[in-house]
Amino acid sequence: MTPMFKRPGPPPLPDSCYCTKCGAIVKNVEVGLTKKMINRGMTEYMCLTCLAEFTGLSEEELLRKAEQFKRMGCILFN
Ligand SMILES: [Zn+2]
């Protein structure tokens, strides 16, 4: 009998890892930005595009802010 090997797929993402607006997968940096720009206690996150729309900033500005926060050692961006 041939043993069956389960292919190790990516671990299932919790709901909070998807954009609440468009359903796109939200990256770490976007989680950090959502918390920083909207509310630290957020448990729902937005992707960069929706976050830009929400805050009125451009995606470039948001990424620049994320870099700043990271350089300041913000734990949200570790
Ligand atoms: Zn989105």
Image: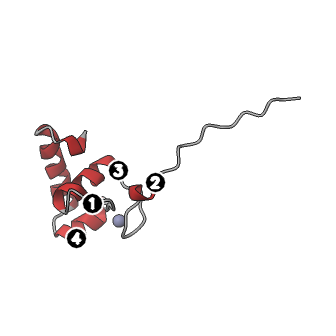
In primary-sequence order, the first of circles 3 and 2 is 2
Which residue sits at x=18%, y=68%?
Answer: 55
Q: Residues within 10 Å of mark 4 (few under 14, many from 20)?
A: few
In primary-sequence order, the first of circles 2 and 4 is 2
User: Residue 73, located in which quarter of the rendered image?
Assistant: top left
In primary-sequence order, the first of circles 2 and 1 is 2
Q: Residue furthest right?
A: 1
Q: Label 2 vs label 4: CA separation?
A: 23 Å
In primary-sequence order, the first of circles 4 and 3 is 3
In primary-sequence order, the first of circles 1 and 4 is 1
Residue tagged 3: 27
Camera-side mark, 1 or 3: 1
Q: Label 1 vs label 4: CA separation?
A: 14 Å
Contact between marks 2 and 1 (CB within 8 A): the answer is no
Residue tagged 2: 14
Does label 3 point to a residue whose CB lies under 8 Å from ligand 1? no
Which residue sits at x=15%, y=57%?
Answer: 61
Relative to 71, is 15 on the left or the right? right
- In terms of secondary structure, where does tag 3 sit? loop
Nearest to the observer: residue 73 or residue 58: 73
Residue tagged 4: 54
- The amino acid pointed to by label 4 is Phe
Q: Label 4 vs label 3: CA separation?
A: 17 Å
- The amino acid pointed to by label 2 is Pro
